[in-house]
Amino acid sequence: MRKLTALLLTAALALGLWGCAAGEGDPSPSLSPEPTATQRPQAQPLALAYDPQLSLHPITGQSQVNLDLAGLVYEGLYELDRSFEPQPALAQSASVSEDALAWTITLRSGVAFSDGTPLTAAHVVSSLNAARNSTLYGPRLSAVTSVSEANGVVAIYLSSPNGALPALLDIPIVLEQESGIPLGTGRYRFVQVGDSLSLQANGNYDGAVPYDIIPLQAVTGADERIAAFDSGDVTAVVTDFSSSYALGYSGSYETCDFPTTTLLYVGFKTTAGACASPQVRQAFSKAFDREELVSALLAGHGDASSLPVSPLHQDYDPQAAALLDYDAPGGRELLLSSGYTQGEDGLLYRGSAPLSVTIVVNNDSAPKQAAADFLAQCLGELGVSATVNKLPWEEYLRALSSGQFDLYIGEVRMTGDFDPTALLTGALNYGGYASQTMPGLLAAWRAAGDEARTQAASQLWQVFAQDAPIAALCFKRGSMLIRWGMVTNVQPTQADPYWNMEQWQMAQ
């Protein structure tokens, strides 16, 4: 695979994706020279970007650069840590009914918004109901039938059981204002003075913060954001190096990666063609060198995964994953045992027909095109003839909807509970996978909690590994870039790049 690594790295460098290397706060090579050994870290203020032309509302807003600020101002009932485990924030405790359809959440006492207004269950109910009707949070709350207040606690009722509901409740709780930005209970509050906007420490927040004031630099596009970071007007930014819109930041900075729920995967047409066979799908999954893909294509900004759940999550089952992990010889043996024979040309045949497949990919994403080419070469090493069909977005969607593919490259941002229902039995099941047992296993896993959930997850992933309805490849990582030597112990998360900010260690 070394030649494939070189090939993909060359392509990626041409795309300008590598502003820095992956790492957990390690100094990273950048497009300009690194600081020399004689340079000393210097205390610098934290200055962030925002888009003044778009809403700063944390529930209804659409601007990602503005949403990245939400964790500094607002808190949810829970927050997801770096392993996607829900940690109580505004929630003090929760209880769930035996059928997992009704949740009762008691709030932490003594919490106030930044203007001193005490937090009540009514504020939580109002915020969650707003989230149910929002583009950003509505899909994850589709099973919520009602949210209400009962004797000072929050009652949430579901149409289907979910033993992991807290993983979906990292939704900002706000106090709406007649005009202006909603207030929060978090570390900072927005303060407008003339044309200048800043974040100022919330005096009602129960905890110390490392900065009293964080100035906000107005930027209205990618070019302005790059320039502001390069000049030092902005000292920290969040980006995704695997995106087609990855920003070419330069200068001396450190990269702090954070795991995400964004899954890159291969979908199989399970209703016809070669991929109608579970053995063939298993073999193809074994052909995919996920670690190489993450290293070469994403420059390490990802977590290889053979299951549609992050390997950092407690529900990941290594034993089930091992049945699908990269094992090219094992994949070849599966194909030979399922009736294919190897010809003198090295290709696999059934009778006189070669084993050939078409991989469909969206052509407006250069990284995904590179992934498709890489996977085609992986299949080629098994003796499979793979053709990559690179289509514009609308044609790509039509090909998926009409089943004009054998395999396709897909990407989806999963919810915090890693529910794969949409991929396996729902709207994203373009491959037509059908199973008598999978719906029941999914339902049992969603409903289970605590120790029962681990057992339910194991049963679910064992059947998934046997059927191989899709081939998970990796979960992408986002990146927070921060000026070199400015601060250490940065631990961003997907929902809050400034998670655990209280533990930051500042340069002296």
Image: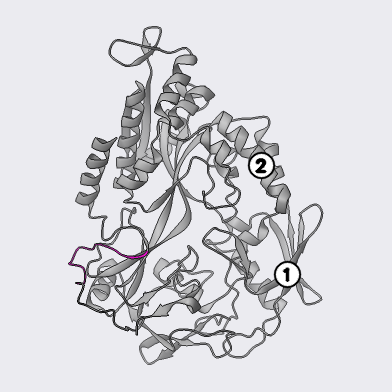
Label 2: state its secondary structure: helix
Q: Using residue 258 as the reference point, say whether residue 92 is left or right of it.
A: right
On whether residue 458 falls in the magenta region, the answer is no
The quadrant of the picture occupied by the N terminus is top left
Q: Can residue 405 be seen in this view?
A: no
Among numbered discs 1 and 2, the one appearing first in the sequence: 1
On whether residue 26 falls in the magenta region, the answer is yes
User: Where on the picture, by quarter, is residue 210?
Assistant: bottom left
Residue ID at (31%, 41%): 369
Residue type, numbered disc 1? Ser
User: Where on the picture, by quarter, is residue 59?
Assistant: bottom right
Q: In terms of depth relative to the viewer, which is nearer, 225 or 211?
A: 211
Residue 386: image location, x then y, percent: 33, 26
Residue type, numbered disc 2? Leu
Q: Which residues are the magenta region?
A: 25-36
Label 1: state its secondary structure: strand
Q: Which residue is labeled 1 in the image?
A: 93
The prevailing secondary structure element of the residues shown in magenta is loop
Q: Can residue 45 be seen in this view?
A: yes
On screen, residue 84 above or below 446 = below
Circles 1 and 2: CB distance less than 8 Å? Answer: no
Q: Which residue is labeled 2 in the image?
A: 442
Residue 264: image location, x then y, percent: 43, 45
Residue ID at (61%, 35%): 462
On screen, residue 507 above or below 450 = below
